[in-house]
Amino acid sequence: MSSKNRTSSPTDLAKASARDLVHLFRTRQASPVEAAEAALARIDKLNERFNAYCFVDRERALESARRSEARWAKGAPLSAIDGVTASIKDLVLTDGWPTLRGSRSTDPKQPWDMDAPATARLIESGAVLLGKTTTPEFGWKGVCDSPLTGVTGNPWNPELTSGGSSGGAAVAAALGMGTLHVGTDGGGSIRIPAGFSGIFGHKPSFGLVPAYPLSMFGTVAHLGPMTAHVDDAARMLTILALPDDRDWYSLPYTPRDFTVGLDAGVKGLRIALSTTLGYAKVDPEIEKLVERAAETFAELGATVTRRDPGFADPADVFRAHWFSGAANQRRAVPADKHPLLDPGFNHIAGLGERISKTEYFDAMNRRTALGLHMAKFHREFDLLLTPTLPIPAFAANHVAPPGQDQTDWAPWTPFSFPFNLTQQPAASVPCGLTAAGLPAGLQIVAAKYRDDLVLRAARAYESVAPIVTPTIDK
């Protein structure tokens, strides 16, 4: 499918959705090579300023795109994302690429001869991998900076944080530096940067997307899609959810296409709106935008009721899991390399070492009770709507908003980590801009294994409030 046989491309390929790209490939109006070149050009133009990628493999991407182009020329694509550009977060293994996990303690001189399940499924589907996206060290915090790779700036204002830990993926999605992006989420790490950066991010039900090796944070950690369009995430999730027997936590595989029924709307759904979860403090401007989004769901035919889910702040339960995971990870780092670690990571690992077995098991039991509580809540409500975050993005290179405790990010992310504890599907979809021009996110939560409802609701909202990404002229 040579570009010499066509005139100019009918759209900006770097910002096109996966659905549009596949249509262009099928109708020979554009090629995967052109799409890859467009994404790489955006990386060349913007990455130095925003730091979304820590590793880019131009030659591999273009060779993969050429193979995809040949398949499309034969009318034999591998999947509904064949030839679509993608990235892998630098916590997820990729054969031939270093996975340094944002840490100076990781030895780059390793074989790097394994694809994690998410990477393998994308390659098998014909996606064109561009490189690795930035993360804080081991994904430990809700912002995106590390001693190894520096600070990742917000796509709306690079002086502000992108959110984390999948900050690089969010920025890449927002700025057209690839179409499909793999994120991880152990306490909000997909939804936090999606909220701050103004893109769509979906944390699937635990076990739906196989993972290997398992995150150091254990069974609170999920993998999922980050995109600028809901349909793109549904296509991507269909691929990521394919089976891999290396993950014995993964669910029994049931073939399904998450784009089927995506446009069924929300008419008749029972939706609860909670702007505080009963205990969180929320910026009034953010709260107003979320309330307006909830009104949109009512206008689309859903029954929307103000209702807090009725549980106490589980931050201490989350910290017991998170800090213990950090301590376990640090045990794997040689003691002489501990000074190389992010001081913040060292701090929470130290706190984790002090958690007793009794305290940990108590946290596990309280986590179970929270999961049961939410299962009962969803007998009455199909969906729960909350803010993704209680505040807009703040200054970069801070763990928390300036003036707050800089050792702990849980206080300013009260809406995300509870649903890692419960393992429910939860997504962030943009719901408007503040007066300062910064994105606000709406979180959509469903009962465990009802990812289809989350995606359907997000698509219904997107259909009347399309996702707007920033325009960068310089």
Image (cartoon, rainbow, N blue to C red):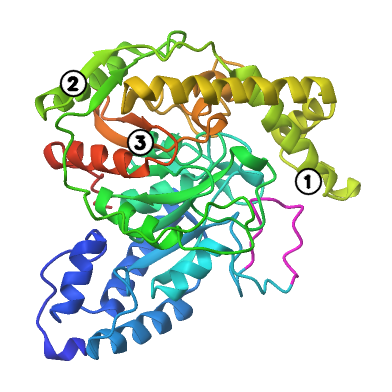
Query: In what element is the residue under mark 2?
Result: strand
Residue at 65% of width from left, 18% of height from top? Answer: 316
- The answer to whether 244 is drawn above or below residue 457 in the figure is below
Q: Which residue is mark 2?
A: 303
- The answer to whether 45 is drawn above or below residue 413 in the figure is below
Residue type at mark 1?
A: Leu
Sort mark 1 into few (<14), some (14-19) or many (20+) by Cα contacts within 10 Å: some
Residue at 20% of width from left, 77% of height from top? Answer: 25
Query: In what element is the residue under mark 3?
Result: strand
Q: Is residue 448 left or right of residue 349?
A: left
Q: Residue furthest right?
A: 336
Q: Is residue 102 left or right of residue 57?
A: right
| Predominant secondary structure, magenta span | loop
Residue at 78% of width from left, 20% of height from top? Answer: 359
**Mark identifier at residue 428:** 3
Query: In what element is the residue under mark 1?
Result: helix
Residue type at mark 3?
A: Ser
- The answer to whether 449 is drawn above or below residue 417 in the figure is below
**Mark identifier at residue 340:** 1
Task: Using the numbered discs, state the Cα–Cα distance from disc 3 to disc 1 in whole angstroms.
Answer: 34 Å
Query: In this picture, which residue range is highlighted in magenta?
Result: 98-110
Magenta run includes residue 103: yes
**Dot 3 or dot 2, earlier in sequence:** 2
**Residue 340 place in picture, x, y as percent:** 78, 46
Q: Is residue 359 left or right of residue 278?
A: right
- Asked if residue 415 shows in the view, the reply is no
